[in-house]
Amino acid sequence: MTKSADQEHASPSSSFPTYVFKGPAQIAIRTRTNDQPRYVDTRLNVWTWYDGGMAMNIDWSGLKLSSEFVEIAKAFMVHMLEKYSPSTAYRAARMLYRVSESDISLRFPWAADEIISAFKSWSSSREYVVVFRTLYRWAMDRGIIGFSNDIYLKIKNFKTERLSPYSRIFLSRSGLELDEEILLLNRIERQSLSDSWEDIQFNIVLHLGFELAPRSIQFHSLDIADFEFIESAYNEKYYTLWLPMAKKVGQRRPERRPRKITAPLGVKISRHVLEIQRRFGNDCEPLFVNPCGRRLSVSEIGSGLKHELREAGIDRPNQVSILLRHHLGQGLADQGTPADMIAELLGHNSTVAARAYVTATPNIARIKEKALGKSPAYQRIMRSLLTGKIVQRRDTAPERAVRGVIDTQYIGDIGACALPVHTHCPYNPIYACYTCKKFHPFSDGRHEQVKEALQREAQRFIDRAEQAGDLIHNRPLAQHQTTILAVSATIERCRQQTEDAADDAV
């Protein structure tokens, strides 16, 4: 699959023979399950492999590529199939189809400007550019004629728009709202299940998605042997699921890690296993199967989960298992779970996603605010402990106005201080004002601006605390959350007074 030393230094226009693929007749690929084909036949015009119960292929006869590059592309596909997961190898196949549709399809070798021109037409699909560069570097490292280091350095510097896969988590809360979680739990715990074992099976899938939030490919890869339970001497049962990891780099077969599950879910799975074995025999390996006894594909699992969520009253476009993963990750972060532990529980290769969930943890304050803000007793306590009476800006002397800096942002026009003029306050302006009886908020003050600035600053404390592994015992963060709640209470008081004044005017 490589050239001789003489061929390495030859030019593309030399008399040396062009590259010819001489790979193995069959390639052993990485598989997730025992019932998945383990080899790809390279003697066929169409190479086919499977992942998640879905067929993937590349039709060499259907590609509009130069004959020499087809030979090189076959060798590259062997490399991808042997080294990476089937789904990653399929990205390389899609990239080759993209090359086939571009202006460089029948040209080889290519000039740098020709490749960059093709890249620009792919800029909306960054993965094609990345995989093409991988191909180019792979061929160059093997000394294949037509690939040069100078051209590689030029195409390596081509920049594409990079959107973080976790940007949605960074920007907003991405899990279920409280009312949606209640609907989901009602669906999981419903008693009036039909006699259909398929319905019961997807109730288990939904329940498992809520507790452990596996990816669809992990649901697909689960075997009956991955479920186990231990019964103690006191007849107490403890249930464990050995969950296959989906995105661990460099593994020939998925690593399985033990995950504890609740007794109600364990009882459901125990009954489900007995029913599967009764229907399809003790030799049936998959934990989730279709009516024919074959392992459910990722698309069937996705469709079933989407149906369960809709039946529960939750309809989120294009979100199924990922919604449950975001909900679990965000819930763990909101409870102060360190990023490395979130990454371990969700099976991530890094803490990038976990840090995205932690970034959203000012939701803690919003959750407390929603829970407490509607309580009359809480409102009475807040009124008695917090600021002085609400006043109008026009009735206040300018020298009594409170102003200060939060999160490097200057903020004024929020209220007035009742201390004698020119009296030095021993506390930090704005930070301490919303819990001080001497502070009189303006009814139309910029309290929302204060709240947003405090939340941003609190996030920086969260980031530092997460790095130090001490989110629970973080006093500055706790003080910020208390102040944010106090500002929220002030905003509500100002709103209520404005409404009352409007009613009196009528």
Image (spheres, rainbow, N blue to C red):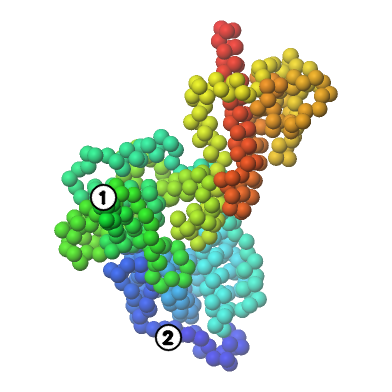
Spot the residue most to the front: 233
Residue 444 visible in the current orientation? no
Considering the numbered disc 1 on the image, is that residue within a helix, a strand or a loop? helix
Q: Position of residue 166 (x, y in %)?
A: 53, 52
Residue in view at x 49 percent, y 24 percent = 375
Question: Where residue 394 appears, x then y in whole percent?
Answer: 73, 15
- Residue at image position (38%, 57%) is 259
Query: Which of labels 1 and 2 is toward the front?
Result: 1
Q: Which residue is mark 1?
A: 268
Q: Amino acid at mark 2?
A: Lys
Residue 497 position (above or below residue 335) = above
The residue carrying mark 2 is 22
The amino acid on which the numbered mark 1 sits, given as a three-letter code, is Lys
- Furthest-right residue in view? 422
Question: Along the line of sight, which residue is nearer the eye, 434 or 499?
Answer: 434
Residue 120 visible to an observer of this rendering: yes
In what element is the residue under mark 2?
Answer: loop
